[in-house]
Amino acid sequence: EAQVTQNPRYLITVTGKKLTVTCSQNMNHEYMSWYRQDPGLGLRQIYYSMNVEVTDKGDVPEGYKVSRKEKRNFPLILESPSPNQTSLYFCASSSALAYRSYNEQFFGPGTRLTVL
Amino acid sequence: SQQGEEDPQALSIQEGENATMNCSYKTSINNLQWYRQNSGRGLVHLILIRSNEREKHSGRLRVTLDTSKKSSSLLITASRAADTASYFCATANQAGTALIFGKGTTLSVSS
């Protein structure tokens, strides 16, 4: 089954404790992206990757890191989480993109993160 | 940065009624997409309309696109309680490097 998986689905942690949220897709997609969703602010892009070893900042990259060593995986790293990173996080992927033209994005189920 | 903005922010209707949501965007596009999100879950792609299309149908969904007004609408006909969800439009950002989502319309369908 074609899907994007995220782990963990729920996480409660404390300020400053490094964490990683994993994202994996089985559709051989080139494009992957991380979003956070907050009430009243909608979906905001954190980082995206056009292909292996190619990553770039989205609208709200501060406090986050990503890597794309393999095509299928795109982990999100919070080196020193803070309470303002409490949010619902989504990973998404899609097939190759033409400039200014995006194909259907497949979303993971989300990771609800609480930083105390 | 928001590219698409949905209107209204919230919509409440009865089962069987039609629901119309609108989306406005700022820059030229190659296509526009609509997604649905059930509460707290991942977004699901509904439909993609290309810039050279004016209207597209998929089951009970009808999407229109007016590139001269930089706007799109999503019509859900004969709504069901299961259509209760948030609906988002999405387009490429100005730099063409990312897909940007609006803040969404929350639809509530009561039986």
Image (cartoon, coloured by chain):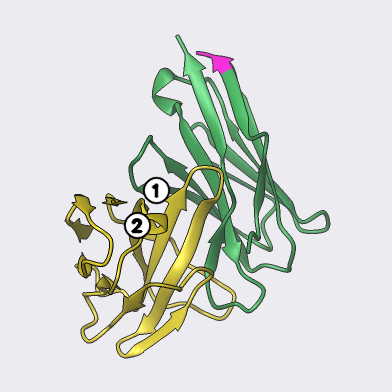
Chain colours: A yellow, B green
Give the extent of the magenta segment: B13-17
Quarter containing the C terminus of chain B: top left
Q: Does the magenta stretch include residue A21?
A: no
* A67 horizontally vs B105: left or right: left
Looking at this view, is A79 or B100 the one in front? A79
Regarding residue B58, the answer to whether it shows in the image is no
The residue shown at (53%, 66%) is B99
* A75 horizontally vs B9: left or right: left
Compared to A81, does A72 lie above or below? below
Regarding residue A88, the answer to whether it shows in the image is yes
The residue shown at (33%, 42%) is B41
Compared to A25, does A2 lie above or below? above
The residue shown at (63%, 79%) is B95
Residue A51 x, y percent position in the rendering? 35, 85
Compared to A104, does B76 lie above or below? above
Q: Which amino acid does label 1 sit on?
A: Leu
Q: Mark 2 points at which residue?
A: A90
Q: Helix or strand or loop: what does disc 1 sit on?
A: strand
Pointer 1 chain: B
Q: Helix or strand or loop: what does disc 2 sit on?
A: strand
Question: Gap in Å between the C-alphas at discs 2 and 1?
Answer: 9 Å
Pointer 2 chain: A
Q: Mark 1 points at which residue?
A: B43
Closest to the camera, between mark 2 and mark 1, is 2
Residue A47 x, y percent position in the rendering? 42, 74
Marks 2 & 1 on one chain: no
Residue B81 x, y percent position in the rendering? 42, 19
Query: Label 1 neighbourhood size at 10 Å, few (<14), some (14-19), many (20+)?
Result: many
Compared to A37, does A76 lie above or below? below
**Magenta portion: prevailing SS class:** loop
Q: Are marks 2 and 1 in contact (CB under 8 Å)?
A: yes
